Image (cartoon, grey):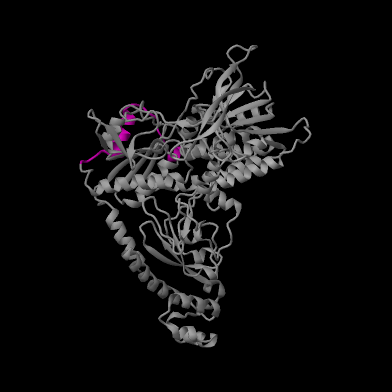
Amino acid sequence: MLGHRISRFGSAIVKQLAREGYLSATYGTRNLQRSYGHYLPSLPMVQRQTRTSQEAFFLNNHRFYTASATSSDETEKITIIFVDKDGEEIPVKVPIGMSVLEAAHENDIDLEGACEASLACSTCHVIVMDTEYYNKLEEPTDEENDMLDLAFGLTETSRLGCQVIASPELDGVRLAIPSATRNFAVDGFVPKPH
Amino acid sequence: MSRYLARYMVSRYFSSVPSRPLHVCVVGSGPAGFYTADKLLKAHEGARVDIIDRLPTPFGLVRSGVAPDHPETKIAINQFSRVAQHERCSFYGNVKLGSDLLLSELRDLYHVVVLAYGAESDKDLGIPGETLSGIYSAREFVWWYNGHPDYSGLKPDLKSTDTAVILGQGNVALDVARILLRPTTELASTDIARHALSALEESSIRKVFLIGRRGPVQAALTAKELREVLGIKNVHIRIKESDMSVTPADEEEMKNSRARKRIYELLSKAAAAAGTSKSDPDQRELHFVFFRQPDRFLESNERKGYVSGVNLEKTILDSTESGKQIAVGTGEFEDLNGSLMLKAIGYKSVPINGLPFDHKKGAVPNVSGRVVSQTLENLSQTEPGLYVCGWLKRGPVGIIATNLYCAEETVGSISEDIEKGVFKSSKAGSKGLMQLLEKREVKKVDFSGWEKIDAKEQQMGNERNKPREKLVTWKDLLAAAAAN
């Protein structure tokens, strides 16, 4: 448990570093503030800033700002943290609009996609680790639920990776890849008594 | 950066030293075999994996089990093909364990032998009349329409009756019902075997009965397949409203399984929608019959040796201590006529010489994939270097994805045994296998041989507007594999 917390804390730092690499002036204030509210409580200064001063803040930190990042196609990225079968947290940057399954494959994360996103299998099953994020997702369709019914280690916050699409409000979401040998505790989820 | 460090540490921890290869043979090239190979190759840089199969074609039930109108499920083949083409992996088809070579020989040649050859036989009902003509196992029927070379000559009679009775209500039962009822114009553009398509085009089957011992809450089918069968064009669904009433025990079962609850809801909706619409000549009917168990098959008076129906006993549910509800006969019987009977009550694995086998379960006794044998004193011990995965390990249940976790567990056991230093001796591996097969004049089909079969089938399919036209005889398959 303790080890788990430490690794989570460590990865939050790594993630933050990764995030700074792609932040730019085109990134919305709302998201910035929310993200920072979540992940950088130690920097109240950032939270209090107005949009303009935030932009200035990042422009001044030009180490993290490159000219190419101004194109919105490239800058609209969020961070998704995969929790792999060993419990290791792997933060990756994912462009808005990309599916979690594609993101996993782009980043060499061991997530199967046997039917290649045609909603015919459950091999890209991921568990959303925080109910708060799970609730931000659109309801799964009947077709996705049909497959989830068969997923190994189904939880109340399970989804298919091919159906979860990166969007700004998912920034920072942690997604666990179910393991045959490891159980996950989902934050904010109380298991039903049997 | 931490990620690469972590990866490095993980791979260091799990990898054997590549200087001396770990020779692995996986028997069976279905999902269980390929997922095992994939995970072994990823976890151990020193692993050399040979996958053997008795058929000239790989992919097991993805080729011969998955229904032809489920092409999206077959996409898994792409990933399996990438595994087969891995530099440390080889596929050898047309190699039969038990006749071309013995298990003991395989264990001599390889450090690790993983048996993943599935379940190629059927459970019996064990009731009178089971050997009458016109009774098939669903596996035989499925292998027939999927062009399995052992069953392409099955020739089930679809012309002398309008009624097919399927015993069982699982997904295989639903697949068979769908193939029997679906308009053949829709099947024509799938990879269904040509002989099956012709027979179905001439079929006189208009009514299909799906018989289950228990109720709609216990049916072992899945929502996608149910939704699909409920939506077939021109098929009227028949479900007795009285069968849909639920007991408190049923409610409890549904509360504990969202899948069961959703399936029950789908069936309820279908039952409510099933009116007594006027019948037109081409109307097809699918009857879900719950709370009935087969008691005996009836022999035809006109055709000696042929089935003409089945006698069913009504059942009620009885709760066991574990909370599971089982069907109990009530002593009340009724006949259901039909001269095509399909038993979809489960597959069974086939034992081979030298392999411990649990005949009751139809699977190999194992602990996390390690094969367990009983000694004389009734103590169990694991067989060094011998593992199982898939249906042979778990029994014939689950979907393709189940094998992912099944393989993970088996490979986990292998990794532990590697760490413990179980595999010290040197083994001949592939080289030894090649010598043995050559000596016995076994004409193995390697992956490039399969690719030739694949290309030929796709080309034949192209001419008929199908994704592929399967080669359905051993002769044609071996000839295509050997072609230049």
B198 up-or-down from B467: above or below: above
Question: Front-most of B140 and B477?
Answer: B140
Find residue B112 and report its horizontal and vertical position in percent. 29, 40
Q: Residue furthest front?
A: B248
Q: Which quarter of the rendered picture does the N terminus of chain B lie within?
A: bottom left
Find residue B172 and report its horizontal and vertical position in percent. 55, 35
Q: Quadrant of residue B342?
A: top right
Residue positioned 53% across, 81% down in the render: A25
User: Is B186 on the left or on the right of A91, as rendered?
Assistant: right
B253 is within the stretch colored magenta:
no
User: Is A84 on the left or on the right of B18, as rendered?
Assistant: right
B410 up-or-down from B435: above or below: below
| Total labels drawn | 0
Residue positioned 42% across, 41% down in the render: B32
Find residue A103 and report its horizontal and vertical position in percent. 48, 62
Query: Is residue A61 in view from this perspective?
Result: no
Q: Quadrant of residue B29?
A: top left
Query: Is residue B157 in view from this perspective?
Result: yes
Q: Quadrant of residue B181?
A: top right
Question: Front-most of A129 and B1?
Answer: A129
B420 up-or-down from B321: above or below: below
Question: Front-most of B354 and A155?
Answer: A155
Read off the magenta span.
B425-449
Find residue B268 and report its horizontal and vertical position in percent. 64, 43
B447 is within the stretch colored magenta:
yes
Residue positioned 31% across, 45% down in the render: B413
Question: Front-most of A69 and B443?
Answer: A69
